[in-house]
Structure formats: C-alpha cells, structure tokens
Amino acid sequence: MSNVMRRWLFLVAGFAVLAVLGWSVRDFEALLASGEVVLLQLAPADPRSLMQGDYMRLAYALERERIELDARSGAIILALDARRIGSFRRLGGAPGPGEVAFRVVSNAAGNGVAIEPHSFLFQEGQAELYAQARYGIFRVDRSGRHLLVGLADADARKIEPR
C-alpha cells in the first residue's frame, strides 16, 4: 500500500471517528434539551475521592426494591407524582399519563435493578452543600434512556453551587 493510500485511509478513518463522536454528543444534547425531568430518591454516601476530587457516591431507593427484570436490561415504568418524583409502577409496556419509561439493568445478584450512574462529581469545597441531596434529577427520553443532570434537596429543588 502506498503512502498516499495510507494517508487517505487514516483521513477517512479520522473523519468517521469524529462523525460518530459528533453524533453521540448531538444525541446527549437533544436529551438534555427535550427529555422529561424525573427525580429519583437517593441514599447518598461518602462525598470524597482522593483521585477525582469531591464527589458523592449515589444509591437509589429503587435499587432496594425487588424488581426482577425478564432480561439483563430493560425499561421499567415509573409513576410520577406532582413534584415529578418517580416510583416503580410496573415492568415494561407503554407509559400512560403520569408515567415514564426508565431504562435499568439487573443488579449483580440478579434480584433487583441497578441504575447508573452511581457517582456525581462536583466542584471542590461544595461537599456540605451537596450533602443535602435527597433526589437525583434525570432527563429521560421516550425510550427510557436517561442522563443524570443534577441533585435536588428534600424539597425537590435543584442544588445550585454558590
């Protein structure tokens, strides 16, 4: 293979990688802009990591319920209250009024679900502020794909750094 051919091959491969990354970023930006807001109750833990800086390790109340998925992953249906706090309603099916699909995976023991992510990073020196967190704020699309966008206090108000 000639040098010219190799250069073209590397150039095409580079553009392909950039296109895939760009599409992924566009996908997440669309989810942030138009996804439904859903809050899930938290059980926070140690707000410190020596390697990463300040963060909060997260556990969700839904993970404590015995929800058994038919497969390793899938969507559960959450009922939303007036404050948009989600609680388990049922496995699968189409969400009705006041409901939303939420993708989960089976936990390691196979007797419940795991919700990602399990950590939330924040600016150093804000641990005391985020220690008030009681809910994770997610943006969720129609298929149940979700993105953690913040934490909320006991009154379901987003915690904003000073």
Image (cartoon, rainbow, N blue to C red):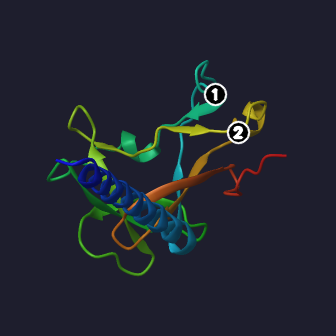
Numbered badge on residue 104: none
Numbered badge on residue 130: 2
* Coordinates of residue 116 in the picture (x, y in percent): 41, 45
Q: As displayed, is residue 140 above or below residue 52?
A: below
Residue at x 14% of width, y 53% of height: 70
Nearer the observer, 118 or 4: 4
Residue at x 59% of width, y 27% of height: 52
How many marks on residues? 2
Residue furthest right as drawn: 162
Residue at x 23% of width, y 38% of height: 111
Q: As displayed, is residue 98 above or below residue 106?
A: below
Mark 2 closeness class: few <14, some 14–19, many ≥20 residues within 10 Å: many
Q: As displayed, is residue 90 above or below residue 130?
A: below
Whether label 2 touches label 1, CB < 8 Å: yes
* Coordinates of residue 58 in the picture (x, y in percent): 52, 37
Badge 2 element? helix
Badge 1 element? loop
Mark 1 closeness class: few <14, some 14–19, many ≥20 residues within 10 Å: many
* Coordinates of residue 17 in the picture (x, y in percent): 36, 55
Numbered badge on residue 47: 1
Residue furthest top as drawn: 50
User: Which label's residue is closer to the chain start, 2 or 1?
Assistant: 1
| Amino acid type indicated by mark 1 | Pro
| Amino acid type indicated by mark 2 | Tyr
Residue furthest bottom as drawn: 97
Quadrant in the rendering for residue 114: top left
Q: From the viewer's perspective, tell me whether residue 34 is left or right of residue 97.
A: right
Q: From the viewer's perspective, tell me whether residue 109 is left or right of residue 50.
A: left
Q: From the viewer's perspective, tell me whether residue 70 is left or right of residue 97.
A: left
* Coordinates of residue 141 in the picture (x, y in percent): 42, 70
Residue at x 28% of width, y 53% of height: 4
